[in-house]
Image (tube, helix red, strand yellow):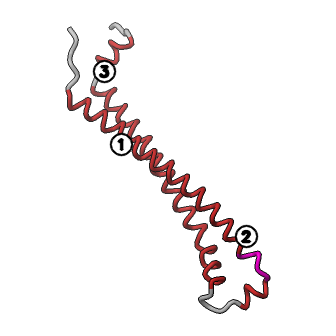
Amino acid sequence: MKKKIHPLFILLMLASILGSAFFVVQGVNMHDEAAKEGEAFHALQAEYYAQSKEARDAAPMGSELNQKLAAIQNAPSELMRIELAGIGKILIGIGALLLGILIALVALPGRVKDSIGYRD
């Protein structure tokens, strides 16, 4: 006689899978965003350094050229933040999925044995 799986357990497994997928997708999207931000950063750098050294040094405080310099100086830390947060979300998603698998293996050892044909 086969035992029925409790509906709450199925709901818990589904939540684990969906939660992990949510975090993995968020992490991948953050990596895509970092790549786009990196391209914009390199374009801004090229535009800034296309100006002569004298023009860059003589730019008045608060000018567009100085604002570009400030954006160039802040961009690497922002790119690193996006990259690391993306990696963290991917790892959280993987961890949530592994936790769901662990719960399944602990909660249903008999069903796992039956499914692979193991006999005592």
| Residue located beneath label 1 in the image | 19
Q: Callout 3: 10 Å neighbours few (<14), some, many (20+)?
A: few
Q: Callout 1: 10 Å neighbours few (<14), some, many (20+)?
A: some
Mark 1 vs mark 3, foreground winner is 1
What amino acid type should be assigned to the residue bearing mark 3? Pro
| Residue located beneath label 2 in the image | 46
Mark 1 vs mark 2, foreground winner is 2
What amino acid type should be assigned to the residue bearing mark 1? Gly
Above or below: residue 84 compared with residue 96: below
| Residue located beneath label 3 in the image | 109
Residue at 71%, 73% in the rendered image: 47
**Image quadrant where one finds the C terminus:** top left
Q: Regarding mark 1 in the picture, which secondary structure is present there? A: helix
| Alpha carbon separation for disc pair 1 and 2 | 41 Å
State yes or no: residue 2 in magenta.
Answer: no
| Start-end of magenta stretch | 48-52
